[in-house]
Image (cartoon, grey):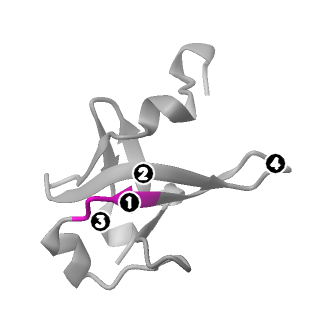
Amino acid sequence: MAEEEKKFSKQLLGKTVVSKTGKRFGEVGDIVFETRSGELIHIILTNPTSYTEKLELEKDKENKILIPFSAVIAIGDFLVVAEEDII
């Protein structure tokens, strides 16, 4: 990743998570990462939409919806995920 492409995690918090087709999932509430390597593991959703609730996605102990960071395909005004990678 080139230097200009780096993002700080606080820049991602609160961004709206959408699919490639524009379906809204919710907002980035937090990010789970591996502390030793810094690898990003999951995005924790806040304010999930009713569409997201129906998908039966993985949840944490607090029943918050988790989206694998590997499904993220773009970060800009929105965080875009590949829906086929999370269902």
Q: Nearer the viewer, mark 3 or mark 4?
A: 4
Q: Main secondary structure of the magenta part?
A: strand
Q: Residue at x 23, y 72 (%)?
A: 52
Q: Which residue is mark 1?
A: 45
Q: Are marks 2 and 1 in contact (CB under 8 Å)?
A: yes
- Rendered position, 48 above or below 63: above
Out of 82 and 14, give the one closest to the viewer: 14
Q: Which residues are magenta?
A: 44-48
Looking at the image, is mark 3 or mark 2 earlier in the sequence? 2
Instruction: Report how far apart the C-alphas of labels 2 and 4 lie in the structure.
Output: 22 Å
Instruction: Report how far apart the C-alphas of labels 3 and 4 lie in the structure.
Output: 26 Å
Instruction: Report how far apart the C-alphas of labels 4 and 1 lie in the structure.
Output: 23 Å
Point out residue 53 in the picture as x, y percentages from the top left corner.
24, 78
Looking at the image, is mark 2 or mark 4 earlier in the sequence? 2
The kind of residue on which mark 3 rests is Glu
In which quadrant is the N terminus drawn?
A: top right
Looking at the image, is mark 3 or mark 4 earlier in the sequence? 4
Instruction: Report how far apart the C-alphas of labels 2 and 1 lie in the structure.
Output: 5 Å
Instruction: Report how far apart the C-alphas of labels 3 and 2 lie in the structure.
Output: 19 Å
Point out residue 80 in the picture as x, y percentages from the top left corner.
31, 47
Q: Quadrant of residue 2?
A: top right
Q: Are marks 3 and 2 in contact (CB under 8 Å)?
A: no
Q: Are marks 3 and 4 in contact (CB under 8 Å)?
A: no
Q: Which residue is mark 2?
A: 29
The kind of residue on which mark 2 rests is Gly
Q: Residue at x 55, y 35 (%)?
A: 9
Q: Which residue is mark 4?
A: 37
Instruction: Report how far apart the C-alphas of labels 3 and 1 lie in the structure.
Output: 14 Å
